[in-house]
């Protein structure tokens, strides 16, 4: 099997890694001539950290990233206190990464590219998809290099202006709100404590102002502020004037402006995520406002959902991609849009991201199924001890491209290649665990639970 992936952002990289580790031939092309070096999406949610654990990059992500910082709030020049988007919580047996992590998108992509190279696959820069057609059993793609590629499947992870989506004629339903604009970028700020985020608001209108969030791996902040001039030139001098206006003269001296852009809310969802042998994922399929930090994370999980299904190849499996991921994207777009509206209305709770932004509650279950834990739910982690007394975790057993069959105190052997026997006593099976550690599974002796390759209950 061979898969061609267009677009080497976090979505395309995640998909390429997942396919490559399954032994699927994959090419990852990128029309840009060089890798970009700016922050863009810098918030990694807990479920994405679990995906990165499975892909073998979690240690580097945690090492290079930083915890989501407290935000020092100053209104009208007066410090009023600290706020957090989410209060940090301790890991639990079922949730090993309960808190998000801040890591600029370019650094996340570099980590993923390094991991992809472990499988002998490199991103092909300056290589653009310029045309394609498909038959019942293949996709014929034309590249800007003049090469014709024949693949079993094509995946467009090529962003909000997706060539793949447009060529397929898939409607991109939603709106662009021209009444809201935001100046975004990366800059260093002498005088500000880099251990904190900073919000400088206007007296009487506390939600109007400028935020600066620390970026890992240096002294830069990602900034954001609504410009008051349609013709604003986003230079360092312009940005310094905005900071002086909201924070006060002399509070922060800006330097090293490496990226800036004017952003408008663009909230869109593709009508379809698939046509025949061609799929779309990430921003090509759904575009989010930055509120809630959902865009990059949703794209990574699109890829994580699609990878094992492409490797499986059965139509009944491939058909579930659009059903599962489009439903989830619609839900997440609602969360992001609600937070954006709160910010627009001056609701200070817009600074806080709730439980539902962690994406740990993503489920593909039938809405009519009200069981505590059922098909389509995320499989929780849990501590284990093997027969030799070594400590390990369920996530250690799930890690990799395979599905896993959990068998609770089985009475008969199994021929499943990745069957794990779990008992509740200190006997001599393959693995055992204390009774209360599996409370989230509500399993009884003799039960069997199949975990999909993407960590959801089958």
Image: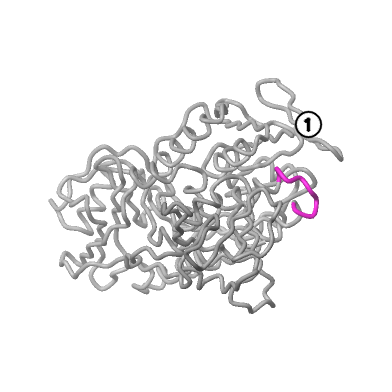
Q: Quadrant of residue 16?
A: top right
The residue lying furthest to the left in this view is: 250
Q: Residue at x 44, y 53 (%)?
A: 392
**Is the magenta region chiefly helix, strand or loop?**
helix
Depth order, front residue of 455/284: 455
| Quadrant occupied by the C terminus | bottom right
Q: Is residue 234 left or right of residue 181?
A: left
Against 49, is 57 above or below? above
Q: Position of residue 312 (x, y in %)?
A: 73, 46
Q: Residue at x 69, y 71 (%)?
A: 366
Q: Quadrant of residue 59?
A: top left
Depth order, front residue of 301/281: 301
Q: Position of residue 244 (x, y in %)?
A: 20, 53
| Quadrant occupied by the N terminus | top right
> Which range of residues does the magenta coloring cover?
310-317
Q: Residue at x 45, y 66 (%)?
A: 340
Against 130, is 341 above or below? below
Q: Position of residue 362 (x, y in %)?
A: 56, 64
- The residue that label 1 is drawn on is 140
The residue lying furthest to the front in this view is: 428
Q: Is residue 284 left or right of residue 117?
A: right
Say whether residue 100 is magenta: no
Q: Is residue 21 left or right of residue 2?
A: left
């Amino acid at each position: 099997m061979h898969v061609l992936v267009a677009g080497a952002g976090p979505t395309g990289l995640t998909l390429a890694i997942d396919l490559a580790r399954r032994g699927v031939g994959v090419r990852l092309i990128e029309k840009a001539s060089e890798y970009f070096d700016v922050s863009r999406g810098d918030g990694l949610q807990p479920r994405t950290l679990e995906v990165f654990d499975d892909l073998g990059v979690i240690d580097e992500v945690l090492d290079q990233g930083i915890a989501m910082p407290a935000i020092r709030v100053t209104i009208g020049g007066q410090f009023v206190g600290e706020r957090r988007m989410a209060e940090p919580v301790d890991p639990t047996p079922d949730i090993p990464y309960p808190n998000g992590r801040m890591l600029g998108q370019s650094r996340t992509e570099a980590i993923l590219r390094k991991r992809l190279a472990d499988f002998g696959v490199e991103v092909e820069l300056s290589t653009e998809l310029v045309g394609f057609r498909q038959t019942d059993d293949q996709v014929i793609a034309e590249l800007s290099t003049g090469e014709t590629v024949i693949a079993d499947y094509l995946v467009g992870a090529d962003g909000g202006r997706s060539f793949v989506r447009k060529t397929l004629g898939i409607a991109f339903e939603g709106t662009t709100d021209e009444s809201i604009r935001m100046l975004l970028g990366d800059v260093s700020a002498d005088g500000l404590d880099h251990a904190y985020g900073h919000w400088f608001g206007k007296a009487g209108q506390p939600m109007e102002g400028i935020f600066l969030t620390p970026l890992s791996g240096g002294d830069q902040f990602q900034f954001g502020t609504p410009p008051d001039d349609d013709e604003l030139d986003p230079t360092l001098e312009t940005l310094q004037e905005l900071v002086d206006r909201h924070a006060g003269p002399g509070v922060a001296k800006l330097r090293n402006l490496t990226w800036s852009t004017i952003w408008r809310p663009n909230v869109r969802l593709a009508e379809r995520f698939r046509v025949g042998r061609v799929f779309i994922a990430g921003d090509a399929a759904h575009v989010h406002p930055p509120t809630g930090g959902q865009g990059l994370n949703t794209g990574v999980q699109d890829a994580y959902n699609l990878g094992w299904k492409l490797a499986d190849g059965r139509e009944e499996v491939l058909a579930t991609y659009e059903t599962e991921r489009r439903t989830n994207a619609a839900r997440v777009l609602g969360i992001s849009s609600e937070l954006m509206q709160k910010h627009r209305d001056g609701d200070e709770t817009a600074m806080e991201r709730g439980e539902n932004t962690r994406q740990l509650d993503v489920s593909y279950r039938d809405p009519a199924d009200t069981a505590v834990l059922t098909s389509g739910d995320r499989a929780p982690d849990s501590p284990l001890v093997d027969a030799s007394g070594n400590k390990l975790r369920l996530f250690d057993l799930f890690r990799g491209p395979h599905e896993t069959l959990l068998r609770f105190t089985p009475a008969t052997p199994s021929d499943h290649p990745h069957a794990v026997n779990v008992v509740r006593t200190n006997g001599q099976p393959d693995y055992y665990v204390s009774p209360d550690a599996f409370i989230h599974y509500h399993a009884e002796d003799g039960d069997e639970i199949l975990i999909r390759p993407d960590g959801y209950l089958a």
